[in-house]
Protein backbone atom coordinates (compact mmCIF):
# COMPACT_ATOMS: atom_id res chain seq x y z
CA UNK A 1 0.00 0.00 0.00
CA UNK A 2 1.09 3.58 -0.73
CA UNK A 3 3.04 5.59 1.80
CA UNK A 4 0.95 8.22 3.56
CA UNK A 5 1.21 11.71 2.09
CA UNK A 6 2.84 14.15 4.55
CA UNK A 7 -0.20 16.44 4.28
CA UNK A 8 -2.34 13.75 5.93
CA UNK A 9 -0.20 13.11 9.00
CA UNK A 10 -2.44 15.25 11.26
CA UNK A 11 -5.38 12.97 10.30
CA UNK A 12 -3.56 9.63 10.39
CA UNK A 13 -5.47 8.64 13.56
CA UNK A 14 -8.68 8.53 11.50
CA UNK A 15 -7.46 5.97 8.92
CA UNK A 16 -8.87 2.45 8.94
CA UNK A 17 -12.25 0.89 9.59
CA UNK A 18 -14.54 1.85 12.47
CA UNK A 19 -17.70 0.07 13.61
CA UNK A 20 -20.36 1.32 15.99
CA UNK A 21 -19.82 -0.47 19.30
CA UNK A 22 -23.44 -0.03 20.35
CA UNK A 23 -26.24 1.38 18.19
CA UNK A 24 -26.12 5.09 17.50
CA UNK A 25 -29.03 7.30 18.47
CA UNK A 26 -30.98 9.23 15.86
CA UNK A 27 -33.37 12.04 16.66
CA UNK A 28 -34.95 15.23 15.43
CA UNK A 29 -37.99 17.13 16.67
CA UNK A 30 -40.07 16.03 13.64
CA UNK A 31 -39.27 12.27 13.66
CA UNK A 32 -39.49 9.36 16.10
CA UNK A 33 -36.14 8.49 17.72
CA UNK A 34 -34.32 5.59 16.04
CA UNK A 35 -31.24 3.41 16.47
CA UNK A 36 -28.70 2.50 13.82
CA UNK A 37 -25.35 0.84 13.26
CA UNK A 38 -22.66 2.36 11.10
CA UNK A 39 -19.32 1.36 9.59
CA UNK A 40 -16.80 4.01 8.59
CA UNK A 41 -13.95 3.39 6.13
CA UNK A 42 -11.11 5.92 5.82
CA UNK A 43 -8.31 5.12 3.36
CA UNK A 44 -5.74 6.80 1.13
CA UNK A 45 -3.76 6.00 -2.01
CA UNK A 46 -0.75 8.24 -1.34
CA UNK A 47 -2.49 11.45 -2.43
CA UNK A 48 -3.00 14.29 0.07
CA UNK A 49 -6.60 13.09 0.30
CA UNK A 50 -8.50 10.66 2.51
CA UNK A 51 -11.20 8.61 0.78
CA UNK A 52 -14.16 7.74 2.97
CA UNK A 53 -17.37 5.66 3.00
CA UNK A 54 -19.95 5.71 5.81
CA UNK A 55 -22.60 2.97 5.67
CA UNK A 56 -25.45 2.96 8.18
CA UNK A 57 -27.95 0.16 8.75
CA UNK A 58 -31.04 -0.40 10.85
CA UNK A 59 -30.09 -1.56 14.37
CA UNK A 60 -32.78 -4.26 14.48
CA UNK A 61 -33.49 -5.51 10.95
CA UNK A 62 -29.97 -4.65 9.61
CA UNK A 63 -31.34 -3.11 6.41
CA UNK A 64 -29.06 -0.58 4.67
CA UNK A 65 -30.01 3.01 5.43
CA UNK A 66 -28.06 6.25 5.09
CA UNK A 67 -24.81 6.13 3.05
CA UNK A 68 -22.24 8.80 2.40
CA UNK A 69 -18.92 8.81 0.64
CA UNK A 70 -16.35 11.39 -0.29
CA UNK A 71 -12.96 12.92 0.25
CA UNK A 72 -11.16 14.78 2.98
CA UNK A 73 -8.51 17.40 2.26
CA UNK A 74 -6.46 19.69 4.48
CA UNK A 75 -5.38 23.17 3.50
CA UNK A 76 -1.56 22.90 3.47
CA UNK A 77 0.16 24.51 6.44
CA UNK A 78 -3.08 25.04 8.35
CA UNK A 79 -5.50 23.11 10.57
CA UNK A 80 -8.31 23.76 8.05
CA UNK A 81 -10.13 20.61 6.93
CA UNK A 82 -12.63 20.10 4.11
CA UNK A 83 -15.03 17.18 3.61
CA UNK A 84 -16.43 16.75 0.08
CA UNK A 85 -19.50 14.55 0.51
CA UNK A 86 -22.14 12.72 -1.55
CA UNK A 87 -25.13 11.27 0.32
CA UNK A 88 -27.53 8.59 -0.96
CA UNK A 89 -30.45 10.86 -0.10
CA UNK A 90 -29.56 13.07 -3.10
CA UNK A 91 -27.52 15.62 -1.20
CA UNK A 92 -24.01 16.77 -2.03
CA UNK A 93 -22.12 18.89 0.38
CA UNK A 94 -18.88 20.65 1.20
CA UNK A 95 -18.21 20.91 4.93
CA UNK A 96 -15.29 22.83 6.34
CA UNK A 97 -13.85 23.29 9.75
CA UNK A 98 -10.86 22.77 11.94
CA UNK A 99 -8.75 20.04 13.37
CA UNK A 100 -7.79 20.63 16.98
CA UNK A 101 -5.82 17.77 18.50
CA UNK A 102 -7.91 14.72 17.58
CA UNK A 103 -11.16 16.63 17.30
CA UNK A 104 -12.66 17.67 13.95
CA UNK A 105 -15.39 20.30 13.90
CA UNK A 106 -17.16 20.83 10.58
CA UNK A 107 -20.09 22.74 9.17
CA UNK A 108 -21.75 23.18 5.78
CA UNK A 109 -20.08 25.57 3.36
CA UNK A 110 -22.07 24.52 0.29
CA UNK A 111 -25.00 22.19 -0.28
CA UNK A 112 -26.97 21.03 -3.31
CA UNK A 113 -29.56 18.33 -3.93
CA UNK A 114 -31.43 16.56 -6.68
CA UNK A 115 -34.55 18.38 -7.90
CA UNK A 116 -36.73 15.57 -6.52
CA UNK A 117 -35.02 15.06 -3.14
CA UNK A 118 -37.38 14.18 -0.32
CA UNK A 119 -38.66 17.04 1.86
CA UNK A 120 -38.07 18.63 4.31
CA UNK A 121 -34.86 20.06 2.89
CA UNK A 122 -31.93 20.37 5.23
CA UNK A 123 -30.16 23.72 5.01
CA UNK A 124 -27.23 23.45 7.39
CA UNK A 125 -25.29 20.54 8.88
CA UNK A 126 -22.59 20.52 11.52
CA UNK A 127 -20.63 17.62 12.92
CA UNK A 128 -17.91 16.77 15.36
CA UNK A 129 -15.59 13.76 15.14
CA UNK A 130 -13.70 13.25 18.34
CA UNK A 131 -11.15 10.60 19.28
CA UNK A 132 -11.77 9.81 22.92
CA UNK A 133 -9.09 8.96 25.49
CA UNK A 134 -10.43 5.35 25.55
CA UNK A 135 -9.62 4.97 21.82
CA UNK A 136 -13.23 5.18 20.66
CA UNK A 137 -14.31 7.56 17.92
CA UNK A 138 -17.41 9.64 18.49
CA UNK A 139 -19.55 11.44 15.88
CA UNK A 140 -22.27 13.98 16.64
CA UNK A 141 -24.34 15.49 13.79
CA UNK A 142 -26.71 18.43 14.07
CA UNK A 143 -28.79 19.99 11.30
CA UNK A 144 -31.29 22.72 10.56
CA UNK A 145 -34.10 22.97 8.04
CA UNK A 146 -34.59 26.25 6.22
CA UNK A 147 -35.29 28.89 8.85
CA UNK A 148 -35.28 26.32 11.66
CA UNK A 149 -32.95 25.88 14.63
CA UNK A 150 -29.86 23.63 14.67
CA UNK A 151 -30.81 20.41 16.48
CA UNK A 152 -29.03 17.13 17.04
CA UNK A 153 -29.81 14.35 14.53
CA UNK A 154 -27.18 11.72 15.31
CA UNK A 155 -24.87 10.56 18.06
CA UNK A 156 -22.74 7.44 17.80
CA UNK A 157 -19.47 5.92 18.99
CA UNK A 158 -17.25 3.53 17.05
CA UNK A 159 -14.48 1.05 17.87
CA UNK A 160 -11.59 0.32 15.56
CA UNK A 161 -12.51 -2.79 13.55
CA UNK A 162 -10.24 -5.77 14.03
CA UNK A 163 -10.76 -7.18 10.52
C1 LIG B 1 -34.60 11.86 8.71
C2 LIG B 1 -30.91 14.47 7.05
C3 LIG B 1 -27.82 10.99 8.36
C4 LIG B 1 -31.55 8.18 9.54
C5 LIG B 1 -33.86 12.88 8.17
C6 LIG B 1 -34.40 14.11 7.65
C7 LIG B 1 -33.37 14.83 7.19
C8 LIG B 1 -32.17 14.07 7.40
C9 LIG B 1 -33.43 16.20 6.54
C10 LIG B 1 -35.89 14.49 7.64
C11 LIG B 1 -36.33 15.05 8.97
C12 LIG B 1 -37.81 15.36 9.00
O1 LIG B 1 -38.59 14.60 8.41
O2 LIG B 1 -38.18 16.37 9.60
C13 LIG B 1 -29.75 13.75 7.29
C14 LIG B 1 -28.42 14.23 7.01
C15 LIG B 1 -27.54 13.26 7.38
C16 LIG B 1 -28.34 12.16 7.90
C17 LIG B 1 -28.11 15.58 6.39
C18 LIG B 1 -26.04 13.24 7.35
C19 LIG B 1 -25.31 14.31 7.53
C20 LIG B 1 -28.55 9.92 8.78
C21 LIG B 1 -27.99 8.66 9.23
C22 LIG B 1 -29.03 7.87 9.54
C23 LIG B 1 -30.25 8.63 9.32
C24 LIG B 1 -26.51 8.29 9.31
C25 LIG B 1 -28.87 6.48 10.04
C26 LIG B 1 -29.65 5.49 9.72
C27 LIG B 1 -32.69 8.96 9.44
C28 LIG B 1 -34.03 8.45 9.72
C29 LIG B 1 -34.91 9.52 9.51
C30 LIG B 1 -34.09 10.64 9.08
C31 LIG B 1 -34.38 7.04 10.17
C32 LIG B 1 -36.46 9.51 9.69
C33 LIG B 1 -37.16 8.81 8.61
C34 LIG B 1 -36.87 9.41 7.28
O3 LIG B 1 -37.17 10.61 7.08
O4 LIG B 1 -36.27 8.71 6.45
N1 LIG B 1 -32.50 12.89 8.00
N2 LIG B 1 -29.67 12.50 7.83
N3 LIG B 1 -29.91 9.87 8.87
N4 LIG B 1 -32.76 10.25 9.07
FE1 LIG B 1 -31.21 11.41 8.53
Image (spheres, rainbow, N blue to C red):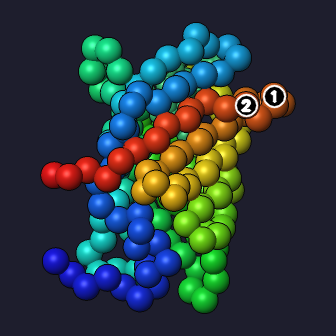
Extreme residue in the front direction:
134
Q: Residue at x 60, y 40 (%)?
A: 141
Q: Quadrant of the N terminus?
A: bottom left
User: Residue 75's x, y, as percent?
Assistant: 58, 80
Secondary structure of the residue carrying numbered label 2: strand
Could you tell me if residue 88 is visible in this image?
Answer: yes
Residue 15 shown left or right of residue 147 in the figure: left
User: Residue 25's x, y, as percent?
Assistant: 52, 26
Q: Residue at x 60, y 89 (%)?
A: 77
Q: Separation of disc 2 and disc 1 at Cα? A: 9 Å
Residue 106 shown left or right of residue 64 in the figure: right
Observer-nearest of 15 and 86: 15
Q: Is residue 52 above or below residue 139?
A: below
Q: Is residue 4 above or below residue 55?
A: below
| Count of marks overlaid on the render | 2
Residues at discs 2 and 1 in contact (Cβ within 8 Å): yes
Q: Quadrant of residue 124?
A: top right
Q: Is residue 116 above or below residue 155?
A: above
Instruction: Assess disc 1: are there few (<14), some (14-19) or many (≥20) residues with their C-alpha within 10 Å of its C-alpha.
Output: few
Residue 44 shown left or right of residue 98 in the figure: left
Kindly identify which numbered label has been placed on residue 163: none
Residue that carries the numbered disc 2 in the rendered image: 151
Q: Quadrant of residue 20?
A: top left
User: Residue 120's x, y, as percent?
Assistant: 65, 22
User: Residue 137's x, y, as percent?
Assistant: 46, 51
Q: Nearer the viewer, mark 2 or mark 1?
A: 2
Residue that carries the numbered disc 1 in the rendered image: 148
Q: Quadrant of residue 60?
A: top left
Amino acid sequence: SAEINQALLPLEWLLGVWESDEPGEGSFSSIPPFRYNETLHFSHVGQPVINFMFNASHAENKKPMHRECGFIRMQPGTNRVAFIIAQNSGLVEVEEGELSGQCLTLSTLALARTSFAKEPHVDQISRVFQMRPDGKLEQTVSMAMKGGPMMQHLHITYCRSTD
